Each structure stands twice: as structure tokens, then as C-alpha cells.
Image (cartoon, grey):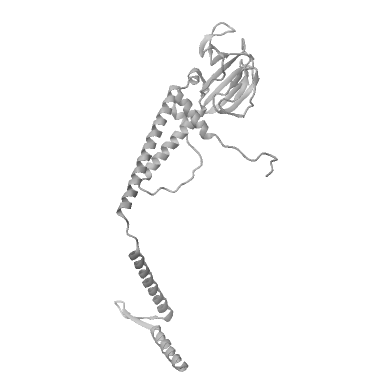
Amino acid sequence: MTNLVQAKNGVVVLKFRNVFKPRDIFFHDGKSLRRVSVGVPVQMVAALAALFLIGWSAFAAAQFATARTVDPAEVARMEQQVQSMQADVQAIKAMADKRYQMTEQALRDLGLDPQRFQGTGGPFEAVEPLGTASDPKFKQLFTTWKRLDQVEQSTLAIPSVEPVKGTAFTSGFGVRSDPFRGRAAMHAGIDLAGPVGTKIYATADGIVARSEYNGGGYGNLVELSHGRGIETRYGHMSKRLVAEGQRVKRGDVIGLMGSTGRSTGSHLHYEVRIDGKAVNPIPFMQSNDYLLAVQRRAAAATRVAMGGPQEGATK
């Protein structure tokens, strides 16, 4: 029995060897008859590649035959969802455009060029391009919201609250009779009178550019730089409560009212300057409700949540 099996195996091996054996292939190249010898390894590789292709084709055909048929109703529902989403995008963009236009108008009402608040910059960071048919709408929405966010955040630099509370308005902006010389002179700000020690507040977010005693008439002076070329000055203080380089927020107490420098009594001399030029502070103190709402929204967006375990606390 064993001899019979061995004999059959020998026949199979012999047949296999007869399939894969060196062969000569003849072909005519147009000039002469040529011969190419194809060895056993090359024939075996070709056979394996053919078997792989046949198997892969059979698998793909089986997958295609068993694939689930797409439901037309489901396709229609998905298309409807996409259209609804695109409509929502357009509605949001329209709202953002309106808010942007209203913010621009509020800036113009103060005599400020909206372009002043639209500077861009920062390091370049490439992003992969979007690849669907609806991408242009999303790109437009992103651009609109980015522009709106930029201009609204920039409004934090605009002075828009009163620097003191419960005081009397005693002198306006512009040409007036100088209280010391009795002749016409330019008054670069407004005077707000009150008791010595009355709290003085920053009217916009900014950085303390100067906190010093000024011999030119301001006395104790605090100057805040709010960016975008906007500055405010607070003169005649009895005490300065901030230092140069310090960052302050709108509503922070920066000093106390007094009568230092060229002053006839306790009051605050308050100035607003644009690109170094003094402008009338009154319109800024009377900012409309919309601009104030924009500033509150921008301030809320930049507020950082803080927390953590108490020092020395144990679990």
C-alpha cells in the first residue's frame, strides 16, 4: 500500500516538474528569428500572480453581489439635510454681516475709521483645503465671523464709560478762557470736579504707558494706551494706583482725584487721544447701547476661567 502511494506521489511530482521546466520561446523581431529562455522561477512567479488576480477578482465579484442596495428615500433625506444645513449657514452669515455693519456704524458715529480695527497678522499655518461642494458657503461664514470677531474684540480699546462717578462737569473740550492767564487757550480734555479721593476708573482695556508726576501741568498723571492708536489721560490725581507697563481692564481703579499740577481745585482732567491728537471725550462717554453691548460681549469672550485646589488642601 505504501509503495502504491509513493508511486502516485511520484507521478504527481513528475507532472508538476513537467509543467514548470525551462522553456524556449521563439519570436521574429522583423529582421531575424530570436530565442528567449524562460526559467522555472519566472514561470512559478507568473503562475502565482495569475492565481492571486483570479482570487481577488472572485472576492470583488462576491462583495459586489452581496452589497446592500442604496435606498433612494435615504439618499433624498440626506440631500434634504444638506440643503437645510446650507440654508442655516446662509442665515447665520446674514446675521453676522448685519452685526458687522452695525458695529462699523457705531465706530463711525465716534469719528473712528472702521479700517483702524481690521488689522491682521500672525504666523502662517497651512491648513488642508476643504473638499465638498458646500465648502464655499462654510468658508464665507468662517471669514465673516472671523472679521466680525476681530472688529468686536478691537472695540475693547475704545473708551466708552465715565472715568468718575457722581461728579460735576466743569469745563469742556476746545477753546476756553484759561483760568490762570485769563486769555483764550485750547483745553485738550474735559474737567470733572469732585471730592479729593474720588475713585478714577480706566475707561477701556489697555496698558499703563505713563504713571508719573508731570511738570507740564497735569500733576499726577496716568496715561493708558489702548492700542489702535487710542490713548486716554487722567490728570491732577491725588494718588496714582497703577504702575507703568501694568495691564488694566475697563472699570479698574487707576487713581484718586486730587488737585495736583496746574489746577484750581479737586477735579479730574480727562483726555481721549487718537494717534496723539486730542479729541472731544464727550461722544465716547455717551457711546450708544449697541457699542456697549458689543464691548460686553467681547469682554465675556476673552474672560478666562480660573480655578484649582486651595494651597495646603489635602484629599
- Residue 196, quarter of picture: top right
Residue 65 x/y as whole percent: 33, 65
Residue in the image at 44% along x and 48% along y: 128
Residue in the image at 62% along x and 10% along y: 265
The reply, left or right, for residue 287 in relation to residue 311 is left
Q: Give the camera-side residue of 231 and 288.
A: 288
Residue 7 x/y as whole percent: 43, 92
Above or below: residue 248 compared with residue 281 = below
Residue 112 visible in the shown view? no
Q: The C terminus appears in which quarter of the rendering?
A: top right
Above or below: residue 280 compared with residue 101 = above
Q: The N terminus appears in which quarter of the rendering?
A: bottom left
Q: Give the camera-side residue of 149 and 309.
A: 309
- Residue 42, quarter of picture: bottom left
Residue 44 x/y as whole percent: 42, 78
Above or below: residue 72 compared with residue 245 = below
The reply, left or right, for residue 258 in relation to residue 60 is right
Q: Residue furthest front?
A: 315
Residue 69 x/y as whole percent: 32, 59
Q: How many marks?
A: 0
Q: Give the camera-side residue of 243 and 60.
A: 60
Above or below: residue 195 compared with residue 291 = above
Q: Residue furthest right?
A: 312
Residue 179 visible in the shown view? yes
- Residue 197, quarter of picture: top right
